[in-house]
Image (cartoon, grey):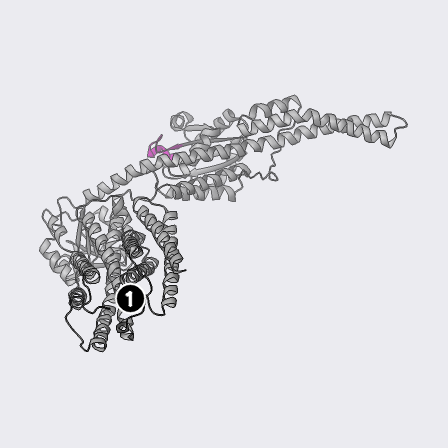
Amino acid sequence: MTHLFFSLTLGLYGIATAAYLTCLLRTSPWITTWATRLLTAGCVAHILSTVHLASTEKHLPLTNMQESLSFFSLMIVAVFLVFEHRYKVTTLGSFVTPVALVMLGVSSTLHGGSRQLPPILQSNWFWIHALLAFISYAAFTIAFGVAVIYLIQRHFLKTKHFGALFQKLPPLETLDEISYRCFAIGFPLLTIAIISGAIWSEKAMGSYWIWDPKQTWSLITWLIYAALLHGRLTIGWRGKRAAILSIVGFVVLLITFFGMKHSISW
Amino acid sequence: MNIIVIGLSHKTATVEIRERVAFSPNLIEKPLRDLIALNDIIEGVIISTCNRVEVYATTRDIAGGIARVKRFLADHHHIPLETLEPHLYCLHSEAAIRHVFRVASSLDSMVVGEPQILGQIKTSYGYAAEYKSSGIILNRFLHKAFSVAKRVRTETKIASSAVSVAFAAVELAKKVLGDLSDKTVMLVGAGEMCELAAKHFLNSGAKGVMVTNRTFERAERLAEEFGGEAVRFEELFDHLHRADIVLSSTGAPHIIIGPKDVEEVVKRRRFKPMFFIDIAVPRDIDQRVDDVESAYLFTVDDLQEIVQANLAQRGLEAQKAEEIVDQEIGQFFKWLSSLEVTPTIVALRNRFEEIRLAELEKTRSSWKDLSPDTEKRLENLTAAIMNKLLHAPTAALKKAGQGGRVDLYVDALRQLFELEAAAEDKEELDLEEE
């Protein structure tokens, strides 16, 4: 059942991504509408797959790379759909859906398999930590997509190059607003995620902070987004600087997520 | 029945001529009544805009109808026909249909794709409908033209891009600032182009206008016109931070706004983006302003470039639009032809039936001891003969109707069988071609 929904999700995301990419090349209200519908359908299938998996395993499916990637991907799609509905930014999908698709694709190649839940993970603090971390990651992923579009669009404006792509991409101010929303959602969640992670660490290992690479890199990620949000709120950092920092933040986030193994093994 | 179009447009006549032939919408009732009172003219619609004056009419006699409408135009406006004639185009049948479809779709406009023309035709048609000068054919014809125009609009990108400098400025500003409804415009100097652009910005929802000028009185006057706020020229930089859009067109020989000024202003705005348009020659705004973060400067050349690109794009889209028009002409022509065929078939049948019944009656009164059974047989026999005889011509006529070459058959039948001219009252024939 889980597997069936998972395959369905992968298929729908694939077609939806193709549709979103087509939106960059052609103007067709028909494709735009169907891109959203397909992605929404994919998202529903994804939720069903995740819920089913959770109910068979009796816990949130966040305990290994396969499950985590799939969940990350689900959060990205869900957050994007909310923003698309709110701001009518189809072209953002052309930049975000490929990320979600690749993550889900990678997830599908990994070996999951059900197994006994390690006792170290049997803590509510862990679930809060993981869940919030992924929602914040998704928000930052959207912010990354927005930042890339921002830089492209800004380049067109500064070089006075007004081609077809320029016409399609959203206005700078809209991008700026979406990016701000992403930080406003993502940053507090990341903060709580790190705190709850620290509490979990204390419960599991007796120390709040053990300076393992995962924790250290999480802190770096947090500092970058803190700087971004601080700059924005105090002196009004936006535009190119904010966009570049947002991209840097996302790269660091990926390093934290993929590159850094927990020293705690389970 | 034929559709004819007689008119002149920016392509065939100068504005002086067009002015003299224009019809005022307030006084359109009389010309419409005069038009349909003409011999051979059955229905009529008059379109009058600043770029074209056209008469659409239906007639049985193409040449006569055209001549009478020409004379009508000349007489109505007291212009010698010889003066008017070289500027007039006269179209009929398929060419007339194509012309009207193209006009409604804005393919014949001075600026191809401009959206006003459709509204103007709708208004003109509204008068014709109100004063009942248009009938079933022109009603159908113009509604078809409107639907063709709508198809062109939705299926091609012909009208989706800005083709004037002022409008291009608005489109570009939206690409930077997004929604303009909470944005303020600052006019520096008072060039005509700036005023036009400011109007476009206000129409697109901009919140307010500030005006500054070396002569404060002029600034005040203009501010009043826009319902905005006048700013003393010396105080420009005290107010500039409140503007999201700056339109500059002073006659000053030197730079008025430099990069340092803008850096200050942008900082005060906490890097909220600013959109500058410099229309002045020589320039008012230093080119280096564009290098300031969150400041976007465009010159009139940049805007011109957009306009040129959009015009080229429209040219491509226009070809698609022509194809749509071609498809729709075929459909409408079929309907128009079928309109001819059906009444003729009915008339032919009636004529035969009339003869049959008359002869039957004669026989019945001269035939003594006619049994009901024989009478019934006679009735059936004559009906069968009539149907057999009518079958081939009816089929041929229907076929001709679909092919479009129907006039010949209809005229021949009318003369051969002394049919009355097809009933003018075709209201009951609502043949939908879809």
- Quadrant of residue A237 in the image? bottom left
Closer to the camera in the image, A41 or B263: A41
Instruction: Tell whether position B11 is magenta.
Output: yes
Q: In this view, does B380 lie to the left or right of B184?
A: right
Q: Is residue A20 left or right of residue B126?
A: left
Q: Can residue B259 be seen in this view?
A: yes
Q: Position of residue A74 (x, y in %)?
A: 32, 60
Closer to the camera in the image, B321 or B361: B321
Q: Can residue B24 be seen in this view?
A: no
**Which residue corresponds to the image point at 22% horizontal and 50% vertical from the top-left?**
A153
Q: Which amino acid does label 1 sit on?
A: Thr
Residue corresponding to mark 1: A63
Q: In this view, does B148 lie to the left or right of A180?
A: right
Q: What element carries label 1?
A: loop
- Quadrant of residue B74 in the image? top left
For disc 1, the neighbor class at 10 Å (few under 14, some 14 to 19, many from 20) is some
Quadrant assignment for the C terminus of chain A: bottom left
**Which residue corresponds to the image point at 36% horizontal and 70% vertical from the top-left?**
A58
| Residue lying furthest front | A116
Range of the magenta residues?
B8-20
Against B264, residue A162 (above or below) is above
Q: Where is residue A44 in the image (x, y as percent from the top left)?
A: 39, 59
